[in-house]
Image (tube, grey):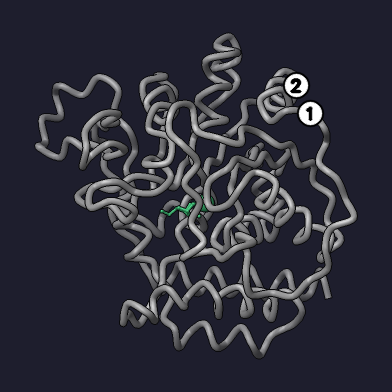
Amino acid sequence: MRNIIIDCDPGHDDVIAFLVALANQEELNILGITTVAGNQTLTKVTNNILKVQDYLGVHIPVSMGYSTPLVKELDVQPQAHGATGMDGPQIPEPHSKPTGMHAIEFMKKTLMEAEDKVTMVCIGPLTNMGLFLKTYPELREKIDCIAIMGGGINRGNTLIKAEFNIYHDPDAAKIVFDSGIKVVMAPLEVCYAASILLTETEKFAEGGKVSRFVYDLMKFYQGYAIRNGWDRTAIFDAVPVTWLIHPEFFTAEEYEVYIETDGRYCRGMTVVDTRGYKGELKNPKTVLVDADREKFIEFLFKCINKLDRIYA
Ligand code: RIB
Ligand code: CA
């Protein structure tokens, strides 16, 4: 059993990552969810996770974090996630409310009260995580690992060389990567390697309540892939969550990783040192470099089918 806090900006893939965690609570004890601005505004991404929980009848505490990056301006992504941040599914507006506690205060309280260490699952910009580490450095010892979706080894998405979560708040990402806490990084390459085929998505339409919700999510979300002529789409944020449960699905390497916080073309780039000087590693990150796509997708369907039975 691993205690986790999910820090997210839902976001279609954030929601699916949450569902994977929800389907595996015997391995992942979800202590709470914190939200951060990224794919959409803080209000919208918070509303989205509350909507999903209410739709399923789940009540994991949700605490709102920062509404802007540390330095940059907010740069939401309607082209990928729509005006609401979760366009597609038509589910009721939430009746539940966030805790009213700020995300970093929720992190502080939860880490102090936890008997064992906690894994931070960060699948949005790292604003909350970075500021938590700056504000409460004494609680770093209660974190066993920070598992993130973010960065790229040789490429970006939002910029040629910068992936969105790091691009959106590179200053916060630098705090996290320089913290000395174990970081497990799921960059773009491993997420693309674990992509779901557009033809595979159709199978969700044949399932129960949760499967059909995921189908509605994916029909909107994969529009971006279709517009680019791709036959598959990456469910980015589900990768680090799946790694926590099935690390054997992935290939990992230990690399030094540096965050570029300046530069006209490369601000937000993760500079991954793949030169192979193993003897000189001082603060290496566990970087996921490849995935067994079939096992990943089979597990995803297994998780959603399990939720169909639980939340019928
Ligand atoms: O680049 C992919 C990441 O950006 C994912 O976390 C997605 O949800 C968006 O936040
Ligand atoms: Ca995200």
Q: Is residue 45 left or right of residue 296?
A: right
| The quarter of the displayed image where residue 142 is located | top right
Relative height, residue 128 to residue 190 (above, below): above
Residue 212 vs residue 307, the one in the foreground: 212
Looking at the image, which residue is at 61% across and 54% down? 10
Relative height, residue 115 to residue 294 (above, below): above
Q: Which mark is nearer the camera, 1 or 2?
A: 1
Q: Earlier in the sequence, mark 1 or mark 2?
A: 1
Residue furthest toward the top?
138
Q: Is residue 92 left or right of residue 106?
A: right
Q: Quadrant of the N terminus?
A: top right
Q: Amino acid at mark 1?
A: Met
Query: For the residue labelled by badge 1, is the local secondary structure a helix, a strand or a loop?
Result: loop
Query: For the residue labelled by badge 2, is the local secondary structure a helix, a strand or a loop?
Result: helix
Residues marked 1 and 2 touching at CB (< 8 Å): yes
Looking at the image, which residue is at 65% across and 49% down? 27
Q: Amino acid at mark 2?
A: Lys
| The quarter of the displayed image where residue 295 is located | bottom left
Relative height, residue 242 to residue 86 (above, below): above
Q: Is residue 67 left or right of residue 298?
A: right
How crowded pointer 2 is (Cα within 10 Å; few <14, some 14-19, many 20+) is rated as: few
Residue 307 vs residue 80, the one in the foreground: 80
Residue topped by disc 1: 101
Looking at the image, which residue is at 41% across and 55% down? 248
Q: Is residue 272 left or right of residue 198?
A: left
Q: CA distance from mark 1 to mark 2?
A: 10 Å
Residue 118 rendering spot, x and y as whole percentages: 62, 30
How crowded pointer 1 is (Cα within 10 Å; few <14, some 14-19, many 20+) is rated as: some
Residue 206 rendering spot, x and y as whole percentages: 66, 90
Q: Which mark is residue 288?
A: none
Residue furthest toward the right?
95
Residue topped by disc 2: 109
